[in-house]
Amino acid sequence: MSILTQIAGWPLLAALALVVVPRNYRVVIRAIAVLATFISTVLAVKMFVGYGCAVPDAEGFRFVQQIPWVESLGISYHVGVDGLNVGLVLMGAIVAFAAALCSWEIKTREKEFYILLLVMSGGILGAFASLDLFFFYFLHELALVPTFIMIGVWGRGERKNYATFQITLYLSIGALIALLGLIALYVQSGANTFDIPKLVEHLKSNPLETNAQNFIFPLLLFGFGILVSLWPFHSWAPLGYGVAPSPTAMLHAGVLKKFGLYGLIRVALPLLPEAAQTWANVIAWLCVGNILYVGWVAMRQKDLNLLIGNSSVAHMGFIFLGIASLNLIGITGAVLIMVAHGFLAALTFALNGYIYQQTGTLKMSELGGLCRKLPFIGTALLMAAMAGCGLPGFANFVGEATVFFGAWTVFPTVTVIALWGALVIGGVYMTRAIRNALHGPLPEKWSALVDASSAWRKLPYALLLLCLLVFGFVPKLLTEKINPDAGKIVTVVAAAAPAEHALVQVDVPTARAQSSEIEQ
Amino acid sequence: MNASLISLEISVIGLGLVLMLADLFMPAERRKFLGYAAIAALGVLLLASFAGCGSCSLTGTAFHGAFVNDGLSLFFKRLFIIAAILVLFVAVEFSDRLTAISEYYSLIVFALAGMLFAASANDFAMLFVSIELITITFYVLVSFQRNKLASLEAGVKYLILGALSSAFMIFGIALIWGTTGQLNFTELAAVASQFADSKIFLLGVLLVLVGLGFKIAAFPFQIWAPDVYQGAPTPTTAFLAIGSKAAGFVLLMRFLFSAIPSITHSHALSTMLIIVSGITILYGNLCALPQRNLKRLLAYSSISHAGYLLLGVAALNANGQAAILYYLAGYLFTVLAAFLVIALVLRQLETEDVSGLAGLNQRSPLLAATLTIAMVSLAGIPPLAGFFGKFLLLKSVVEAAQTTGNPGYYCLLFTALVGVVISLYYYFNVVRAIYWSKEPKDVSPIEMSGAAKLTAWLCIAGIFALGLFPNAVLNFALLAVGGLK
């Protein structure tokens, strides 16, 4: 059995086990959930560390396992990692562990909550490890549905029902459109297999017709785009995260949302290379909507959670920009931000959850001076905010800088706008939020707040911060893994470029050299 | 003539007669257990069909080609027997609310016989007779609670509309026979293409489709479904939802793909199927949104599922036909799970309102889980049977869209997606009522007999098995539709 099956399997097994645990054994329920995600995390770290030593198979994937499932349709359970998803699996496992640790804030119907949380964690990890289109979608859907239920039942605030309704509607439609695109891709390829590596091989020699590509690509782009809150389909995200219980927001904003981006890189780009060239412009300009428009919206927010939600939508813009650049540096950067933003989003939502737990509000006008009462949480939030506006030393900086280097050669105008959005707008709202919430006079009513005191409570925040810093200082851990596999995709896309309007200069060696300069 | 081909049907009819006769000799308080005897007998027949004994292992035609045993009939016969077994389990649980329970059992068995004949019908005469056998039995089954006004009303409505649709159908059959001189599907297929321009022949085809559309409750012949589903005794509703619908579908597939394949693959008919399927999906789902009565909600949901199943018909390819078979197999366990819970939970309640489910997870965790799994599967969420069925149906329509290039198929796909999204709302409303109602009035635990527990576990196992291990059933379904065009 592959280690990846175990990473995804432990949470799912634990969810099954919880079904038979009586609901008043609260400690046991919690312990099982934390333990299962902890085992996943340990295994994921082991997998990440052992990645270099593992022997890749013919298609370049490691830790592969394949079991036929439905032969007549060519569906098999196929998991494996290469540079593109090894970081995502690690990030997903760590965030799942942190989310399970942060779930102490849930006080009602704990059993159901932990079951859903574990199903969600297992589903996400499985989806990222999956190399079969069917299971890729199947496991994502398995993780998605618990999200709706958790927001609907354990959500907070008056707009809970509206937000649940909106997020369910948006994400279901997005997922179904993506499903349609995936089925169309399967049918059109004629290879009678859902296996991604086989499809890539097959379509390399018999590429789809341009018409078919141009029809399927938008289905995937907008289907996945809705899942990732691509502007203008983003309005579910800030509101949804605003009302979601923090473990759900951590897992969704941090991990599950990356599914759409990962799908674009893993499926849409290599399988529909010609259409990717055509649509790259559209993606680049839509991402301006994310970075600039949603950034402005974030500046106007009065609620800390809505601000963070908007800023997380804005960050998706950088990833889209990296994907749209269709070159080695850009895509490497996109994957880097995906990992970094996963840690960051989880950290900020966890911290917000802590503050909400203590104060019962996240309105910035009512907060203030919290750093005095909550030195640990306050400091962590400050660091998260700095990571969010791209301070060097945090993993986000590396990713964003890489994306800008990649995008500059292709979309200079968009890059300039995006830089402005990242440095100026991001800086303004983040620092303003910090000043309003953490500094200034401490209102009388908050004098009884308690900081995260025990090591147990501090652990999730510290863990996520540590990850941000580790990948910020040693991005090479990720880039050296991402680079060769991002290179393969870029080669496939570039090979399909019609000579006259090629967006991509096929210049992989220099690109690789440039990106290794960035690492230095 | 090869009478051994119909040994299964003969045994089932014999079983019905024995049940009726046993009623005379059984003391009243023991009659309830006749249901278990019927279940055991059907179980033996089912095992025999899997073991390859009896008529199920034989293929061929009988009665001058009017009756055919092939892969398709075998698939549906097994489906019908499983459905009847599960319905009888529900009926035993329901028996305290019915007088003359042994007649009820035997009527279910007779309806099953009609369905078995429908699965093998290869001739208009056989088609009509089997439909009538099913429908007339259902008139009685629907109005069986003679002391309940709603049940009688439902029976009368079903009778009037059913008779009307039968009249349409027999008129259509007459027109087809009048123009072509053929009643046998195989012989009709050979000559049908010559009549592609005959208006009278096409009218006949249309009228037969009207009759079949009534059976499967497709738009615009769905109008009876909500009232009848609501008024009928719960086991009848369950059998109506799966047995009668599946019988309609097997006849529809035989008619379209083995009697008149040349007409079916024409542009006009495929467009019509696309439109009917799309409207049925939207109608069922939109009307289900405001429903508070559980059985009525399931009636509208069953209309929408008829629409999804029609996707597979409209796709006009073998994968679509196999998808219908697969979907029906999943639907069987799902619907019976739902109706089992309704029969047990709403036993004491006068209303069948969704609010009656409040606190169910404290009253009986097994029933709560059963209904939740059923709803989630109906909504089409992995890893349950409904998801894989919908996936197959959508896939077949995508294939049709890409091979024919007909833009109607793309519209149909998006309609189906919209339908799925709408349906999430009302299915999850039911789940919410189970787990998260504000103040459940009644928290007394619900007694479940061993048989009821067994049924619940069988349904759950079926839903999960079809969602997680689709291989065997899918291969069987692909094999079964091999003879269709």
Image: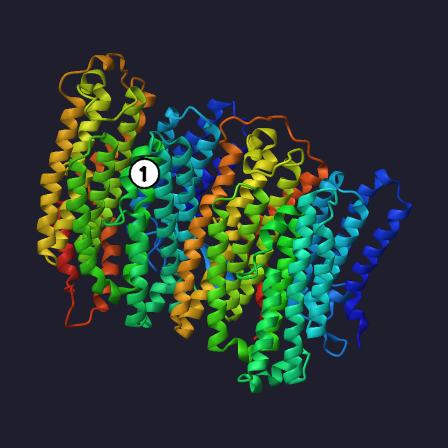
Give the side of residue B215 with respect to residue A403, left or right: right
Residue at 48% across, 44% down: B290
Q: Nearer the viewer, residue A225 or A84?
A: A225
Task: Name which residue type carries label 1.
Answer: Gly
- Outermost residue toward the right in this view: B25
Q: Nearer the viewer, residue A86 or B144?
A: B144
Q: Position of residue A390 (x, y in %)?
A: 14, 39
**Helix or strand or loop: what does disc 1 sit on?**
helix
Task: Determine crowd level at label 1: few under 14, some 14-19, many 20+ residues with C-alpha closer than 10 A.
Answer: many
Residue at 56% across, 84% down: B198
- Outermost residue toward the bottom in this view: B194
Give the side of residue B463 with respect to residue A64, left or right: right
Residue at 47% across, 46% down: B289
Residue at 16% across, 67% down: A502
Q: Is residue A300 above or below residue B204?
A: above
Q: Examine the rendering and report whether any part of residue B40 can be seen.
A: no
Q: Quadrant of the C terminus of chain B?
A: bottom right
Give the side of residue A509 with respect to residue A149, left or right: left
Q: Is residue B102 above or below residue B197?
A: above
Q: Nearer the viewer, residue B159 or A209?
A: B159
Q: Nearer the viewer, residue A494 or B267?
A: B267
Q: Quadrant of the N terminus of chain B?
A: bottom right
Q: Position of residue B313 (x, y in %)?
A: 53, 67
Chain label for disc 1: A
Task: List the residue tagged with mark 1.
Answer: A240
Q: Examine the rendering and report whether any part of residue A506 can be seen.
A: yes
Q: Position of residue B407 (x, y in %)?
A: 38, 69
Q: Position of residue B68 (x, y in %)?
A: 71, 72
**Chosen colour scheme:** rainbow
Give the side of residue A128 with respect to residue B464, left or right: left
Q: How many marks?
A: 1
